[in-house]
Image (spheres, rainbow, N blue to C red):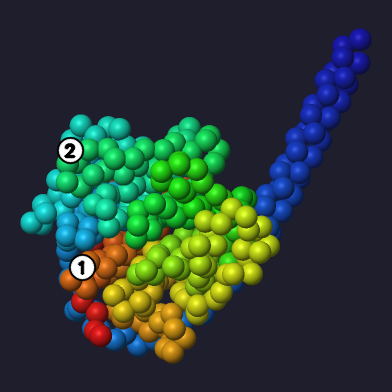
Amino acid sequence: MEEAHLRLEEEAVSKLWKVLAALVVLLAAGLGLVKLKYGGGEPYPDVSTAPVLPESALETLVTLDYPPGNVAVAPDGRTFLAYHPFAQAARFSDATVFELSGGQLRPFPDQAWQARYQGVFGMTADAQGRLWFIEPMVLDHKQTRLLAFDLRTGTLAFEYWFPAGEAQFAQDLRVAPDGNTVYLADTGLFRFTPAYLIALDVAAKTWRKVLAGDPSTQPQGWLIRTSFGPHRLGYGLITFSVGVDGIALSGDGAWLYYGAMSHERLYKVPTAALRDGALSEAELAKRVAPVGPKPLSDGITVDSAGNVLITDIEHGAIDRLPVDGAGKLTTLVRSPRVVWADGVVVAPDGAVLFTDSAIPAYVDQLARPPTREALKAGGPYHVYRLRPPP
């Protein structure tokens, strides 16, 4: 009887080990499929040129304890910046959104508002004297929020909460010259969800999602390389592959320029077509036109001459691309000091300001909130300024 009982136990243990072994095989196969589908990527060719400006042309505008995300300059020259939400600096700092004045950071619009922010990604100032922010729900929030402040009074001038699950990766934005439309870029979640553009009517608080899944807004199969190695997550399972990221408007607001981070080309589309609800996706896609080659990029902006300035995240550089087809992509400046050239803007005096968010320095393989020690090790962090040649 005892021997029979022991045999039964041995058989049960044997079956358990077989089940566990089968689960391990299935898990390994599943991880292999994930890596095969989402963890690939080819190195991107270096499309930069010899820099027009020497590295010494980079002026440090401000040095920070935590990484900056984006920077905005109002028509009157007032300058604003925010800590990058990936750093989740609110755990260690009593303010995350600032006005930079006289080399000093002042909480914007005041200290009381700091606790109400949920992670400012994109920011831009419009011609109506408003400073706009987009706060995506991606960082464990229930809804994405778009808001604007009156720069004269510091009071809230606009607030809109997208429905839950919508615009969840919206992270860059621009406002039409007349102030009536806000354009946003939603990067999508790597290749798991599609990237797209949004056109939002300010007065009506209605919006249109467009070019979702269009090749121009989606990431291509490129592997981002940084000074910290290939940019992957999950210990190589997922390549950091990002869709439409930087957007910019032509001076007259007639064109929206846009580029996916992991894409080889910059595109443009008429803003009138983006606002036209009668156009089908197929009809809208026919109005998209390539502008020219670009590096793997984050932020973009347009200078006073109508050129698009593009951050090069692999080489710590700022590139310039004429949009009339008459010129080629040119590198303005390049520096090994810059880990990840992120947000970029042109000030009224023509100076170019850009942030180094240094993302690879503190985002770990599981995308966990970085520790204070990791953030300190990656710093100090900088916002740079340069004055490009004509």
Q: Is residue 131 visible?
A: yes
Q: Residue at x 61, y 63 (%)?
A: 284
Work out whether residue 45 or residue 147 is closer to the camera in this orientation and state it: 147
Work out whether residue 323 or residue 357 is closer to the camera in this orientation and state it: 323
Residue 159 locus on image (x, y percent): 36, 38
Q: What is the spatial separation of the Cα atoms under label 1 and label 2, in whole angstroms? A: 25 Å
Residue 14 locus on image (x, y percent): 82, 30
Using residue 379 as the reference point, say whether residue 291 is left or right of it.
Answer: right
Label 1: which residue?
Answer: 348
Q: Are marks 1 and 2 in contact (CB under 8 Å)?
A: no
Using residue 283 as the reference point, say whether residue 205 is left or right of it.
Answer: left
Counting residues from the start of the chain, the first of labels 1 and 2 encountered is: 2
Q: Quadrant of residue 314?
A: bottom left
Work out whether residue 191 or residue 376 is closer to the camera in this orientation and state it: 191
Q: Residue furthest top?
A: 1
* 187 up-or-down from 54: above or below: above
Label placed on residue 217: none
Q: Residue at x 20, y 32 (%)?
A: 112
Q: Residue at x 43, y 80 (%)?
A: 323
Using residue 36 as the reference point, say whether residue 251 is left or right of it.
Answer: left
Q: Residue furthest left?
A: 102
Residue 382 locus on image (x, y percent): 23, 60
Label 2: which residue?
Answer: 110
Q: Secondary structure at mark 1?
A: loop
Name the kind of residue labelled 1 in the image: Pro
Work out whether residue 283 or residue 143 is closer to the camera in this orientation and state it: 283
